[in-house]
Amino acid sequence: MRILVLACLVAVLAAGDAPVFSDTEWAATQTPAARPAAETPGWGTVASMGVGLLAVIGLAIGLGYAAKRLGARRLLGGRGRNLELLETIQIGPRRSLALVRLGSQWLVVGMGEKELSHIATLPAPAEQAPSAFAAELNRLVPAPETKP
C-alpha cells in the first residue's frame, strides 16, 4: 500500500508543474448543486442546533445517572456473577479472614497488611429452601409486576 502511494506521488511530481486540469475546466464540471452556498445559516438554524445538542447531552447525562442509580451492572450481569465476597471478619489489627465464593466453591482467604493467603477450599453448600417465615412473607407480599 505504501509503495502504491509512493508511486502515485512520484508520478505526480514527475509530471512537473503542468496542471492536471485548468480552472475553467474545473468550473465547467461543477453543477450549481455542487457549488457551496453563499448564504450563511441564520440564527434560527444555529439556535435549533444548539437546543438539539443540549437535549442530547441532557439525555446522555440522565441515562448515565439512571443506570448508576438502578445498578445497571447488576442487571446486566457485569459484576458478581462468578466471584463474590461473602463475609469478612477481623482477627487482629490489620488481619482478617474472608470467605469468597468462586463459582461453585468457597475459598477461605487470610488477608494481612501486605499479603493474601489461601487457607482452605470448601464446596459451596446447596441452595437452602426458604424458611417457613420467608415462604409466608412471599405469599403475603407478592413480587412487583414488571411491565414490558
Image (tube, rainbow, N blue to C red):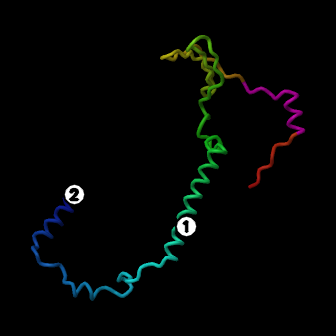
How many marks can you see? 2
Q: Position of residue 12 (x, y in %)?
A: 15, 70
**Number of residues whose C-alpha sits closer than 10 Å to that of mark 2, classed few (under 14), some (14–19) or many (20 or more):** few
Residue 85 vertical placement versus 1 (above, below): above
Which residue occupies the foreground of this view, 96 or 47?
Answer: 47
Please state which of residues 49 and 35 is positioned toward the viewer in this rendering.
Answer: 49
Q: Is residue 56 magenta?
A: no
**Residue at 36% in and 81% down:** 36
Mark 1 surroundings: few (<14), some (14-19) or many (≥20) residues within 10 A: few
Residue 117 position, x and y percent, is 52, 15
Under mark 2, the amino acid is Arg
Label annotation for residue 2: 2
Q: Secondary structure at mark 2?
A: helix
Picture coordinates of residue 84, whole percent (x, y): 62, 29
Q: Is residue 11 left or right of residue 29?
A: left
Asked whether 21 or 1 is in front, the reply is 21
Q: Which mark is residue 52?
A: 1
Quadrant occupied by the N terminus:
bottom left
Name the residue at 16% across, 64% down: 7
Which stretch did the figure color magenta?
126-140
